[in-house]
Amino acid sequence: MTDQPVSVIIVSRARPDALRRCLAAVAQLQYSNFEVVVVACPAGIAAAEQPDVLADIKCIPFDEANISAARNIGLIHAAGEVVAFIDDDAVPEPQWLRHLVAPAARSNVAAMGGFVRGRNGITFQNKARTLDAQGTPEPVDIDPFQATILVPPKGRAIKTEGTNMAFRRDVLISIGGFDPAFRFYLDETDVNMRLARAGHATALVPLAQVHHGFAPSAMRRMDRVPRDLYEIGASWGVFQRKHIPKEARADHWKDQRSAEWQRLMLHMVAGRLEPRDVRRLMRRLVAGYNEGQTRSFGCGPLARHAAMPFRPVKSAPRVARFSAVRGLRGAAALKDAATRVAAGGGETVLVLSRTALFHRVYFDAQGVWVQRGGLFGRANRDEPLFRLTTFARRRAREMARVASVRGLIGE
């Protein structure tokens, strides 16, 4: 069966190193028919155009702090039947695209959303969620191993995460794409609400996984402490005007202010913010909200025909290999794995120490998927703190845990 054409859209601003890492992982996707559209600032364009990154990328210059406008530019230049989005500070698992877009084979599915792992590569930041009428996410239980197609009841929507989502291009165009009034926050939530209002189904796909690093930006620090809350406030102001009845807006805004205050207080108690920082950030939140009450929203019609023809990336199929070594052999194993990656392979290396250390997973600078931890330690955080086992059994268990997202074969 031929893979349907997919456009992978990546928006990047002032994070060229993160973008290079993202593209290195995209180059290892086990999918035969996709193009890459990078919408970026000058530094990002320069990084994406380096010959050792990925050939045949569509690079579109854009240097404004507006992720919705940037995504619309990517959408205009995308020629795939399906458009998939990933952030520049994230890396996809090799089978990400195959799992994510598979539900699009069903004609009633307009959107698809995957799961997002955090910095340790194990814990999930986001799984399956729905949205209530006020845009508040709520968890929902679904099968962890297969896609679940959901049609929300009236007033609710299905949540997709901005760093791991896909849409039928024609459907996203028909509802107006992303609203540039949401420059930083609630952009995909607004899309989710409009899709639900139009009666479209969304598939949530647990095995479509990306690892999200939360790289620093103008809006937040590396430790996820906010630098500015203006655009969050402005986005809530716009969101209310689009989706919340007038009589409910005051109580809704009170709840949002309270939630942000509690978040800032947790950072302050942990020593990451000073009291004066909290006061400044709350003032900025309110100022943004007030401006959001008058900000124009919506955009003009988007072109139904792509501005550029489909340009699939040229990459040979990669054999995804899994190996495991004891701690002292880790450096040599990683060096050998990097050589095979450079030659066109896909590598996962499990490095086990004779300890009960927690495991972590990361995609390293050489393009190798690395998992480190103790032989007796836990990977999934709901596992026992200590489990007596052998090297061979632990190797088999960890390979089985990631095989479906990485398309693995053994040594």
Image (tube, rainbow, N blue to C red):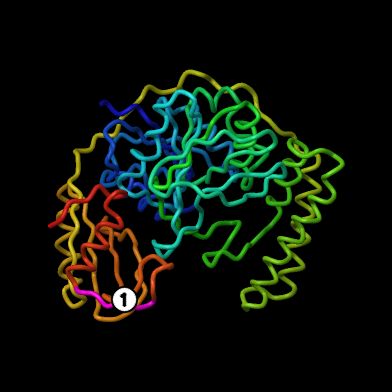
Q: Is 12 drawn above or below residue 110 in the view shown?
A: below
Residue at the location (17% across, 46% down)?
319
Residue 397 relative to residue 88: left or right: left
Indicate the position of residue 106 as horizontal and vertical percent values.
43, 26
Residue 42 seen: no
Boundaries of the magenta span = 385-390
Tag count: 1
Residue at the disc numbered 1: 387
Residue 1 relative to residue 61: left or right: left
Quadrant of the rendering where the N terminus is positioned: top left
Residue at the location (79% across, 45% down)?
291
Q: Is 325 drawn above or below residue 33 in the view shown?
A: below
Asked whether 267 or 382 is in front, the reply is 382
Residue 405 magenta-highlighted: no
Indicate the position of residue 321 as horizontal and vertical percent values.
18, 53
Indicate the position of residue 131 as horizontal and vertical percent values.
63, 44
Asked whether 281 or 51 is in front, the reply is 281
Amino acid type at mark 1: Arg
Residue 83 lies in quadrant: top left
Residue at the location (52% across, 46% down)?
161
The residue sitting at the bottom extreme is 355
Q: Is 231 drawn above or below residue 374 in the view shown?
A: above
Overall secondary structure of the magenta section: loop
Indicate the position of residue 150 as horizontal and vertical percent values.
53, 36
What SS does tag 1 mark?
Answer: loop
Residue 386 relative to residue 179: left or right: left
Asked whether 343 or 197 is in front, the reply is 197
Residue at the location (58% across, 30% down)?
177
